[in-house]
Image (cartoon, helix red, strand yellow):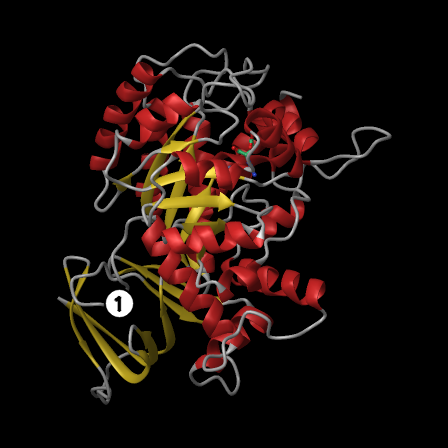
Amino acid sequence: MTTLWFEQALLPTGWRSQVRFHIEAGRFTRIEVDAAPDAGEQRHGSVLPGMPNLHSHAFQRLMAGMAETRSGPDGDDFWSWRDLMYRLVGAITPDDLTAIAAMAFVEMLESGFTRSGEFHYLHHQPTGEAYDDPAEMAFALAVAASQTDIALTLLPVFYAHGGFGGTPPGDGQHRFLTDLDGFARLYERTLQAAATLPDAIVGIAPHSLRAVSPAELLALTMMTKGPIHIHIAEQMKEVRDCLAWSGRRPVEWLLDHAAVDPRWCLVHATHITDAECRAIAARGAVVGLCPVTEANLGDGIFPAASFLAADGRFGIGTDSNVRIDLAEELRTLEYSQRLVRQQRTVLADTIRSNGRTLFDAALEGGRCALADGPALEVGDAADLVELAPAVAAAGDSALDRWIFATGRVRGVWRAGVQVVAEGRHRNRDAIAARFDAVAHRLLVEQR
Ligand code: NGQ
Ligand code: ZN
């Protein structure tokens, strides 16, 4: 049994002072408030529940910052980035994936994420041939999670087609492809990969309406009781192609053809109408916003103010992992709205500060999307994030200073174990060395 004492903690009931957490076998057994510190007890500052990162492709961390040169006279967009991404990551082996993902998980923990939702589709060998074990690469992710102690929600991806209407997959997509039978075997083995970790969860991810047929989508939703994640309406080309194929916009089509409910996470949903905002909110589905990646890829701006006004739920993902920074994701989301509306404190409600409103919403939506229960309650995994101390930072001000000013985390505890101290993960050096070696081989030597 261990205890941890904090000056203030953001509990489900709001900020409470002088909080002592009692932890046994990685879980909270008792939470005391207004508890003066004992003589000699170590005193920590402001603490938050760990945040779920609801959408990550960990392997893309390899190429972060490597797609910023113009590829031709017409400039670049999401689709040219995707071609480059396929080329840069095409040779990743299982050991490479462990090294890359471990680095990404270290950076996630250091920024305040304690669970990653891995939207995982790099299933086969670089040649496209299957590994003997269909979940070879899922096991590689699980090893990275165990090296870093991040909690994992594994979302094996079903990917079968290159575009709407079942067009053939393109070059660069052969590592992703399965049919439904192959996917069923992959899913079963992914459950075993998850079972090697203390608190992993498994869901299913039909990649997008581009990559999955209507019949396949129906079959997939029946295979799991866990979360269901899908990329949707991220790019205008995708909206136009969906209209040409079906006469409906992507979100309209999905809500008409699938039993979308709170188990669903609609990743991006960037290009939606007011009616689609209201319809997603009415179903209780979570929208998976990835503001930094969406800015980097030139996706567009999600209508967050309208969506929140309709009582929509959202969570935060780092997606391409071009940056791994929780405070920056929340800040970028708010700033996108300010720039469009020429106003300040757009996503704040009238009771809570801007930072608090963003954090509460992302926590609730993220936990739902990754099938985690409520945070900081007795029985919950002891996942805690201590902010770096800031001046004049009581209550919501601590969150605002962190999200809008410092961006710095001091300590992180995962299942009761301190994995980040003074902003550094305890295994950072060894993991960074392995990542650097892989990055040098794949990005310098082999190019
Ligand atoms: C992905 N990423 O699956 O990694 C995608 C690119 C696609 C984003 N959508 C591939 N941001 O959507 O076809
Ligand atoms: Zn994605």
Say if 296 sits above or below 211 in the image.
Answer: below
Say if 384 sits above or below 258 in the image.
Answer: below
Left or right side of 176 for 271:
right
Closer to the camera, 171 or 266?
Answer: 266
Residue 50 point in image, percent of width and height:
36, 61
Q: Residue at x 45, y 19 (%)?
A: 160
Left or right side of 182 for 225:
left
The residue pinned by badge 1 equals 376
Q: Residue at x 54, y 67 (%)?
A: 407
Residue 298 point in image, percent of width and height:
69, 44
Say if 43 sits above or below 222 in the image.
Answer: below
Label 1 packing within 10 angstroms: few (<14), some (14-19), many (20+) = many
Say if 356 sits above or below 145 in the image.
Answer: below
Left or right side of 188 for 270:
right
Residue 180 point in image, percent of width and height:
33, 17
Closer to the camera, 278 or 103?
Answer: 278
Residue 49 point in image, percent of width and height:
34, 66
Q: Which amino acid is tagged 1?
A: Leu
Residue 139 in sight in this render = no
